[in-house]
Image: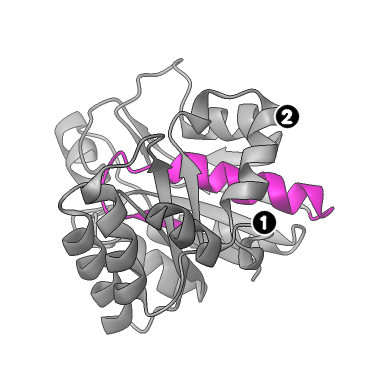
């Protein structure tokens, strides 16, 4: 897995934290890691963006933010309303391919969901993943719409011939209620596989050392961690 696209079932589900967790575990294995954010939205110039969070949490310094738009919109809409050039899909593909030549893992963090548009021609995160031949890690929420959002995301990936690398819950509450507990079974049924991880809420505010410990506990072996989905389900039933 030299290129991994991290997408979400929507905005605010914890993509950046999950991307940082995958990155820090790869670093611990001695792998060269690069992180690319094709489009940062909702952040003004001079303010820290998602790649800055990855640097702080994971210690990865080979990071690239290709485009930034201050409006909290989709990249295509943000570019249009700002009157500036949209994200270049071909440019993003070229950058990622170049980085993959010198790094064992390149993590590409999308913006919002898998079908969020980068430009007026309709290029999406899914198109970027397909052009790169990359697997897609899906970050899901735990709200009442989580199952529906995950179903739409996974169906979109399957329709485009994209292989999911798993489903990770990006922010697992410290005191889960009936909705959150039910979501786990729904997500595993939809993905037709066990969860690939669940990171506790607030992980993005941790220091680097504690975040690395949380990443090891919160991501499955396929992502370099020790998360046990069977044990996680057992704890939910207690």
Task: Identify the magenta region.
Answer: 6-31
Residue 237, picture quadrant: bottom left
Looking at the picture, tell me which residue is in the foreground, 220 or 129. Answer: 220
Q: Is residue 127 magenta?
A: no
Q: Earlier in the sequence, mark 2 or mark 1?
A: 2
Residue 152, picture quadrant: bottom left
Looking at the picture, tell me which residue is in the foreground, 137 or 95. Answer: 137
Can the viewer see residue 124? yes
Mark 1: which secondary structure?
Answer: loop
Residue shown at 46% from the left, 71% from the top: 194
The residue furthest right is: 30
Rendered view: 71 above or below 6? above
Q: Is residue 192 left or right of residue 133?
A: left
Residue shown at 80% from the left, 48% from the top: 28
What label does residue 225 carry, if any? 1
The x, y position of residue 198, in whole percent, is 47, 51
The x, y position of residue 223, in whole percent, is 62, 61
The x, y position of residue 123, in whole percent, is 28, 62
Mark 2: which secondary structure?
Answer: helix
Badge 1 crowding class, 10 Å Cα cut-off, few under 14, some 14 to 19, many 20 or more, is many
Residue located beneath label 2 in the image: 209
């Amino acid at each position: 897995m030299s290129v991994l696209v991290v997408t979400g079932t929507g905005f605010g589900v914890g993509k950046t934290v999950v991307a940082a967790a995958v990155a820090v575990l790869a670093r611990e294995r001695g792998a060269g890691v690069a992180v690319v954010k094709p489009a940062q939205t909702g952040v003004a110039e001079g303010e820290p963006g998602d790649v800055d969070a990855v640097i702080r949490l994971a210690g990865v310094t080979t990071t690239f933010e290709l485009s930034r738009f201050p409006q909290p919109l989709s990249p295509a809409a943000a570019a249009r309303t700002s009157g500036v050039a949209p994200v270049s899909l071909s440019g993003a593909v070229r950058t990622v391919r170049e980085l993959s030549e010198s790094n064992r893992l390149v993590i590409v963090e999308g913006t919002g969901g898998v079908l969020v548009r980068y430009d007026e021609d309709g290029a999406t995160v899914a198109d970027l993943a397909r052009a790169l031949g990359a697997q897609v890690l899906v970050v899901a929420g735990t709200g009442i719409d989580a199952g529906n959002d995950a179903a739409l995301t996974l169906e979109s990936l399957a329709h485009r011939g994209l292989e999911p690398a798993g489903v990770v819950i990006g922010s697992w509450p410290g005191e889960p209620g009936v909705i959150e507990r039910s979501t786990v079974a729904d997500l595993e049924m939809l993905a037709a596989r066990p969860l690939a991880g669940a990171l506790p809420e607030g992980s993005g505010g941790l220091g680097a050392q504690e975040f690395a410990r949380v990443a090891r506990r919160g991501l499955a072996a396929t992502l370099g961690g020790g998360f046990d989905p069977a044990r996680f389900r057992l704890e939910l039933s207690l």
